[in-house]
Image (cartoon, grey):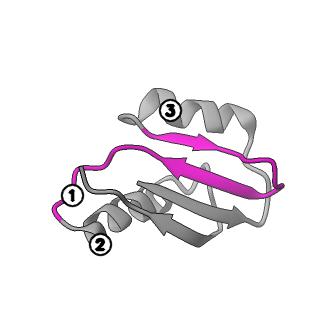
Amino acid sequence: MAAWFTTARPIPIRALQDVHRHDRGLALTQPSTPLVYLLSGQVRAALGAEAVAGVVGFLLQNRHIVDEFTVTEIRAVHF
């Protein structure tokens, strides 16, 4: 599962690192484009919609990291 999103303000580098340490297999990275981020990881879900809800839910629950965001693309692969 991967979700690309944009933010109004930069996310601190420490917060990017903390996501990986504190949440099961998720990684929050910043590609080379400013204010564009990638949240990726393995999400258990029966349907693609559940995987999307899980990732977007993560962003909503972590408003201290990402206060305002716009999801631009989501990709999910079933294994």
Magenta residues, dominant SS class: loop
The numbered mark at residue 49 is 2
Could you tell me if the residues under marks 2 and 1 are in contact, i.e. CB atoms within 8 Å? yes
The numbered mark at residue 35 is none
Quadrant of residue 61 within the rendered picture: bottom left
Q: Residue at x 48, y 55 (%)?
A: 2
Relative to 59, say whether 26 is above or below.
above
Q: Residue at x 53, y 50 (%)?
A: 39
Q: Residue 69 at what x, y percent from top left? A: 64, 68
In this orientation, which residue lies closer to the viewer: 71 or 63? Answer: 71
On whether residue 31 falls in the magenta region, the answer is yes
Image-based side of 61 in relation to 24, left or right: right
In this orientation, which residue lies closer to the viewer: 53 or 72? Answer: 72
Helix, strand or loop at mark 1? loop
Q: Residue 19 at what x, y percent from top left? A: 52, 37
Q: Residue at x 62, y 56 (%)?
A: 66
The numbered mark at residue 45 is 1
Q: Amino acid at mark 3?
A: His
Relative to 36, say whether 17 is above or below.
above
Q: How many marks?
A: 3
- Mark 1 or 3, nearer chain start: 3
Helix, strand or loop at mark 3? helix
Magenta span: 26-46
- Mark 3 or 2, nearer chain start: 3
Q: Amino acid at mark 2?
A: Ala
Nearer to us of marks 3 and 2 is 2
On whether residue 20 falls in the magenta region, the answer is no
Q: Residue at x 71, y 46 (%)?
A: 30
What residue is disc 3 on?
20
Q: Residues within 10 Å of mark 1 (few under 14, many from 20)?
A: few
